[in-house]
Image (cartoon, rainbow, N blue to C red):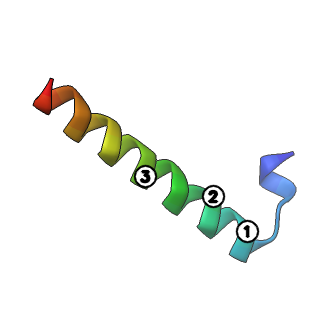
Amino acid sequence: MLGQAPLCCSRQWQMSVAFGAWLGQLNFRNS
């Protein structure tokens, strides 16, 4: 399903996932 998504949508999805992981890492380090 994800593999069938358009390139632009998959790019936004990858960026959102990377951003969420980055925020999670910052929160984990701060706590």
Please state which amino acid type lies under the numbered disc 1.
Cys
Please state which amino acid type lies under the numbered disc 3.
Ala
The answer to whether residue 20 is left or right of residue 27 is: right
Mark closest to the chain's N terminus, 2 or 3: 2
Question: Gap between marks 2 and 3, in whole Å?
Answer: 9 Å
Q: Position of residue 23 (x, y in %)?
A: 32, 45
Mark closest to the chain's N terminus, 1 or 3: 1
Please state which amino acid type lies under the numbered disc 2.
Trp
Residue at 87% of width from left, 45% of height from top?
Answer: 1
Question: Gap between marks 1 and 3, in whole Å?
Answer: 14 Å
The answer to whether residue 15 is left or right of residue 24 is: right
Which residue is farthest bottom?
8
Q: Position of residue 29 (x, y in %)?
A: 13, 30
Q: Is residue 24 above or below residue 12?
A: above
Determine the image quadrant of residue 24.
Answer: top left
Question: Gap between marks 1 and 2, in whole Å?
Answer: 6 Å
Residue at 73% of width from left, 68% of height from top?
Answer: 9
- In terms of secondary structure, where does tag 1 sit? helix
Circle number at residue 13: 2
Determine the image quadrant of residue 26.
Answer: top left
Residue at 61% of width from left, 68% of height from top?
Answer: 11
Q: Position of residue 30 (x, y in %)?
A: 12, 32
Q: Is residue 15 above or below residue 3?
A: below
Residue under numbered circle 1: 9
Residue at 51% of width from left, 49% of height from top?
Answer: 17
Of 12 and 6, nearer the camera is 12
Residue under numbered circle 3: 18
Q: Are discs 1 and 2 less than 8 Å apart at CB?
A: yes
